[in-house]
Amino acid sequence: PSMHYHNSYELYYLQVGNRDYFIEDKLFSVSAGDFVLIPPRKLHRTGGEYGERILIGFTQEFLEKVYTKDTCEHLLRCFSDWKRTPSPSQQALCIDYLQQMLSCKDQVTSALLLGMLLL
């Protein structure tokens, strides 16, 4: 795919496989269990081997449905590091939050779960 950007935050979780992730002029190798955190308006694309993934796009306004502006700014600080690899104990918790988010129909609950995931 070509380089592109979004006006929202993008949380990319690789479930299976290995991928290369390009963000602006940096290259990251991403493996199953890794998160890639892409701030708004950052050019990016993936390449390499196919992998199963979960993508979550959201805005700060979405988080502000349940969190204060200061809390949102705190939660979004994690986007200063573009790649995160959770510890094994964190991994199980992250998967649980992601699964709950995928089946959730309520925006407030989704925003709460997303906040916990970003922590």
Image (cartoon, rainbow, N blue to C red):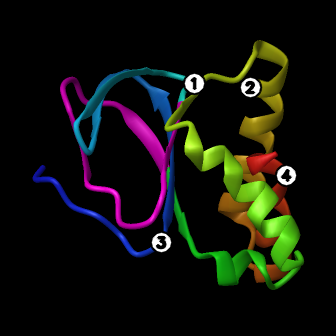
Please tell me which residue lies in front, 78 or 96: 78
**The magenta segment:** 35-54
Label ID, residue 33: 1
Q: Relative to 93, is 76 above or below?
A: below
| Earlier sequence position, callout 3 versus callout 1 | 3
Q: Does 48 sit left or right of 18 as displayed?
A: left
Kindly report the distance in space between the C-alpha atoms of the residues bearing marks 3 and 2.
24 Å
Q: Name the residue under label 2.
A: 91
User: Residue 80, located in which quarter of the rendered image?
Assistant: top right
Question: In the image, what residue type sits under mark 4?
Answer: Met
Report the front residue among 104 and 63: 63
The answer to whether the residues at label 2 and label 1 have Cβ atoms under 8 Å apart is yes
Helix, strand or loop at mark 1 = loop
The residue beneath circle 3 is 8
Query: Could you tell me residue 70's position as x and y percent?
Result: 85, 71
In the rendered image, residue 95, in percent from the top left (x then y), is placed at 72, 37
Magenta segment: does it hold 42? yes
Q: Where residue 61 sits in the image (x, y, percent)?
A: 67, 84
Q: Residue at coordinates 35% horizontally, 69% vertically from top-left?
A: 6
Q: Tag 3 or tag 4, which sits nearer the N-term? A: 3
